[in-house]
């Protein structure tokens, strides 16, 4: 019996998956060959989920809370999210009509894009940037328009340049601050001017604020919600993974207008029915419980950031700016790549095999990431020093120093 070959849909072929996990797999394979690898590639907190959060989930399991919840999440958690947003932004969201809990912030991004975009719409997003933005928009049939972030513009989006990219088909502008992979925090003026621009053109702003609390040097986070004359066209995406070291719990949330909310919930219903019940109980404890574990983690990230800057400053031929948020440094290695005639991805794989250190290649975050590597400092100070010193050794050998 002859079976016709399977034709993979183009919408799947063209999706850009998150390459950090591919690099992690390469690093793990190297370890199986006996290579000692320092892992600075994956964007995952190395801290444990705080105990009171885990205990809340355990108690929920003991109460047999293992059944379906409403598709947008249990009321108690949506109420807690609304309380948090009111406290942080001074904005009143109705938990019944504005707040939906999702299976991670990534699902939130995907569901928002599917709920808003029509075939042929345009989405402007930061690049280098989180690959889910362009992938979700493209899957929804939109044309993806990358806004190029560079060291020279402080890895921040500027309203003046954005205004030149807007067309009658533009529907969404994506903001991400603090930024993955660049470690930058958008200044208040940039955020304010982009909000004004979006309102003038009646565009939606999708603001990914998953790294919101992880900010250094006494800087302040600025959200489009701080400047919007009304919130109907500002869509906030956030979650629990980074702040509370809950990556494996897979919980995020969306704050969105009442108009779009029913359609978002319809998409979520089709995708996953509902988030995990006992994990939602843990998230309530995270929001309403003590926040000291978050502050402790941020203080430790800032110490690690300082170590990254110290060690990178000892290497000739690199360019970088001091990260002010998230837990990444985005380093320009184009001078080194020009010397060896390799791409950033090839360079990263060489570093794993020959020097025992894993970073993320810049093109994992879009084509404009070529010439860069991302260094995650969600690891111990000792490992950060070891990893960057191995990079220094590689650079010195390449440059003949």
Image (cartoon, rainbow, N blue to C red):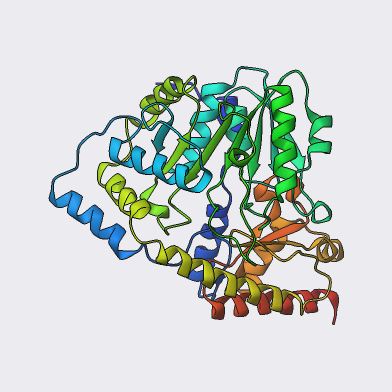
Residue 273 image position (x, y, % from top left): 32, 29
User: Looking at the rendering, in which quadrant would you find the C terminus?
Assistant: bottom right
Residue 106 image position (x, y, % from top left): 50, 41
Q: Determine whether, in the image, residue 98 is placed left or right of residue 325.
A: left
Whether residue 322 appears in this view of the structure is yes
Whether residue 103 appears in this view of the structure is no
Residue 276 image position (x, y, % from top left): 29, 41
User: Looking at the rendering, in which quadrant would you find the N terminus?
Assistant: top left
What residue is rendered at 55% in x and 25% in y? Answer: 9
Q: Determine whether, in the image, residue 384 is placed left or right of residue 348.
A: left
Q: Determine whether, in the image, residue 73 is placed left or right of residue 349.
A: left
User: Which residue occupies the foreground of this view, 208 or 395?
Assistant: 208
User: Which residue occupies the foreground of this view, 17 or 120?
Assistant: 120
What residue is rendered at 64% in x and 38% in y? Answer: 227
Residue 119: quadrant of the picture: top right
User: Which residue occupies the foreground of this view, 338 or 64?
Assistant: 64
What residue is rendered at 46% in x and 67% in y? Answer: 46
């Amino acid at each position: 019996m002859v079976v016709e070959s399977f034709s993979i849909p183009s919408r799947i072929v063209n999706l850009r998956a998150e390459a950090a996990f591919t690099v992690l797999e390469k690093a793990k394979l190297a370890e199986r060959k006996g290579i000692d690898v320092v892992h600075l590639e994956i964007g995952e907190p190395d801290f444990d989920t705080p105990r009171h959060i885990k205990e809340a989930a355990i108690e929920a399991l003991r109460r047999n809370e293992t059944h379906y919840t409403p598709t947008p999440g249990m009321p108690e958690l949506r109420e807690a999210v609304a309380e948090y947003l009111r406290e942080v932004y001074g904005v009143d969201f109705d938990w019944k009509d504005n707040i939906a809990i999702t299976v991670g912030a990534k699902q939130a991004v995907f569901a928002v894009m599917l709920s808003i975009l029509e075939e042929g719409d345009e989405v402007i997003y930061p690049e280098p940037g989180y690959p889910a933005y362009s992938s979700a928009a493209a899957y929804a049939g939109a044309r993806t328009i990358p806004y190029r972030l560079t060291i020279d513009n402080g890895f921040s989006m500027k309203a003046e340049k954005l205004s030149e990219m807007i067309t009658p088909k533009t529907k969404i502008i994506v903001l991400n601050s603090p930024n993955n992979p660049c470690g930058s925090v958008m200044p208040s003026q940039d955020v304010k001017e982009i909000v004004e621009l979006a309102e003038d053109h009646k565009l939606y702003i999708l603001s990914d604020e998953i790294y919101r609390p992880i900010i250094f040097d006494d800087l302040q986070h600025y959200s489009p919600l701080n400047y919007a004359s009304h919130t109907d066209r500002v869509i906030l995406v956030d979650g629990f993974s980074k702040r509370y070291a809950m990556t494996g719990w897979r919980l995020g949330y969306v704050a969105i207008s009442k108009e779009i909310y029913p359609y978002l919930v319809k998409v979520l219903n089709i995708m996953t029915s509902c988030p995990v019940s006992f994990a939602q109980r843990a998230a309530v404890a995270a929001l309403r419980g003590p926040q000291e574990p978050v502050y402790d983690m941020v203080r430790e990230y800032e110490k690690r950031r300082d170590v990254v800057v110290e060690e990178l400053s000892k290497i000739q031929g690199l360019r970088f700016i001091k990260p002010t948020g998230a837990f990444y440094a985005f380093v320009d290695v184009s001078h080194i790549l020009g010397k060896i005639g390799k791409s950033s991805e090839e360079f990263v794989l060489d570093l794993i095999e020959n020097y025992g250190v894993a970073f993320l290649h810049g093109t994992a975050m879009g084509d404009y990431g070529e010439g860069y590597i991302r260094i995650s400092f969600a690891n111990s100070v000792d490992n950060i020093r070891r990893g960057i010193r191995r990079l220094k050794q590689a650079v010195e050998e390449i440059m003949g120093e």
